[in-house]
Image: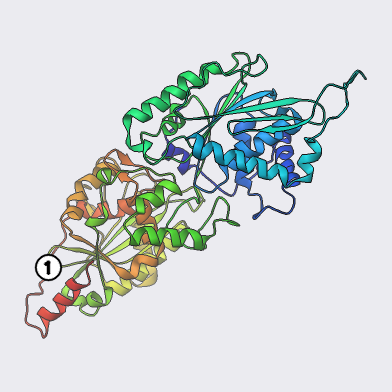
Amino acid sequence: MAKSVDEYLNEVDYSFKDYIPSEGVLKFINFIQMASGDTLENKTPLVHLKMCEAVFNSTRNTAVLCHRGIGKTSVFAEWLFLYAAAFGELPCIGKVEFAVYIGDSIENGVKSLRKNIEYRYQNSEFLQKLIPNKSIKYVDEDGNEDDNVTAGRKITDVRLEFVNLRGDRFVVKMYGAKTGIRGAKEYGKRPTLAIVDDIISDEDARSDTVIKTIEDTIHKAVKYALSPVKHKVIWLGTPFNAKDPLYKIVESGAWEVACYPVCEKFPCTKEEFKGSWEDRFSYEYVKDAYEEAMSIGKIDSFYQELMLRITSKEDLLIPNSSLVFFNREQVLKHKDRYNFYITTDLATSAKKNADFSVISVWAYSNNGDYMLVDGWCDKTEVSKFINKIFEYVSIYNPIGVGIEVTGQQAGFISWLRDEMLAKNIYFNFLSSNNNGEDGIRPTGDKFSRFILFKPRFDTKKVWIANEMKDTAWYNEFEEERSKATKQGFKSKHDDVLDSISMLGSFDAFKPNTYGTYDNEVSEITTIRNTVF
């Protein structure tokens, strides 16, 4: 069944629980270790093995859509070709004699590949033993001698030729994305393997005409240049935009897919961080990249290059320009000037794949502004959620607390009433669409409810305390906000946004704060001046 890129990304779990590598994958990874010797900068990550599984254990063509720096070209072009040269076969298709490589251009991708393969060969005694650069005598399985086989290598700008210790010949012909490959043959045979590697350049990504040409190259020229009997295409890339041909391939459902971002989600805390290759891309690295992108207004590049998320600014429901921030102290030192409300979204499971439980605490101003002063977001037991509600009630004395009364949450109101008696802390329940009974009974789906509330963001009526920026609540808010588009919610969860949408389900009362007090004008000005 076809899935979207966002669905693939939402399913990423870097714990790789119960994963057992296949024999072919282990053999390939061990080959890389032996050939590299002491030159590897980082430990081999499990994600490399999982990427190899997608390539080696399927007869279908494979799309490898992964973040920058994960080693796509190193693993599936440089080392894959050297492995085929050393052993005359590949786990995915068996015996292989001829392959083609398509890069973005001869001067860039092709030239880089050739230099890197040549460097790896020249600096590896292991490779030089398997692919000796000298004449040898070859004895086949029947004991017959052949003095005419020349083992070694021939490397030119657009062609690689290897003959291994056993006499197996392997040829790679290399092309730019916009050059023709029709009629590609070596020693009378068509290629059985094609590696398509990051063929979209920055400039190409902005041209519909160039993209169409590249699509024709892959779906016509490459496809029909391969052997009809046995063939495999491996397409490597990081997306440029939603028009990227690789993006379309991933979502077609016709190819095997390996889709891996730099981490499961970001922003997040260091404790929550689960990366693809933490030995190389640490939490500090990703955090620095994120903060730099935010500061220079290039957050879309961060999500594109590292998180593989493609969302145009025009499609965002809540752009950065709609966000308003304030200093919480300015509100809390005059709590009597605000009416407080608490909205919630309860998850009934604490399992890893469950939804978040969310509590949002709002100060409602006489100007009709909803000001988030506190909040909590966690995957935890219901009892902890209950304790957190009572903690916030004790601090903020809200006019009302919003609790959904649908599905598994239907009995939650009576549970909270019992807790009021036990804790001797009381509060009012908000009511909406529930025949006058306590509790919020939502109408429509979560996305529809958020669309109805969206105008408050557009008119800058939703403010967020600066002090919330380092919390789990805000991290999840940013995760959901950055993927909330006109087409729907594309994030794995939508719990924080749903707790915000609840504000639109009841009528909030403005406080009576028009009395006379000292320095009123200057203090309000101070709050306003903290907005950025």
> Would you call the spot at circle 1 few (<14 residues within 10 Å), some (14-19), or many (20 or more)?
some
The answer to which image quadrant residue 464 occupies is bottom left
Relative placement, left or right, of 312 versus 106 is left
Whether residue 499 is visible, yes or no, is: yes
Q: Is residue 420 visible to the viewer in this orientation of the structure?
A: no
In the picture provided, is 517 more to the left or to the right than 4?
A: left
**Residue 34 pos. (x, y %):** 76, 45
Relative height, residue 359 to residue 98 (above, below): below
Q: Nearer the viewer, residue 206 or 412?
A: 206
Residue 283 at x, y percent in the picture:
51, 60
Quadrant in which residue 150 is drawn? top right
Q: Secondary structure at mark 1?
A: loop
Instruction: Give amino acid for label 1.
Output: Asn
Q: Nearer the viewer, residue 366 or 464?
A: 464
Identity of the residue drawn at 36% across and 61% down: 474
Q: Residue at coordinates 60% horizontally, 16% vertically from top-left?
A: 227
| 175 up-or-down from 294: above or below | above
In percent of width and height, residue 471 lies at 40, 65
Quarter occupied by the C terminus? bottom left
Q: Nearer the viewer, residue 234 or 79?
A: 79
In this rendering, would 38 be left or right of 110? right
**Residue that mark 1 sits on:** 366
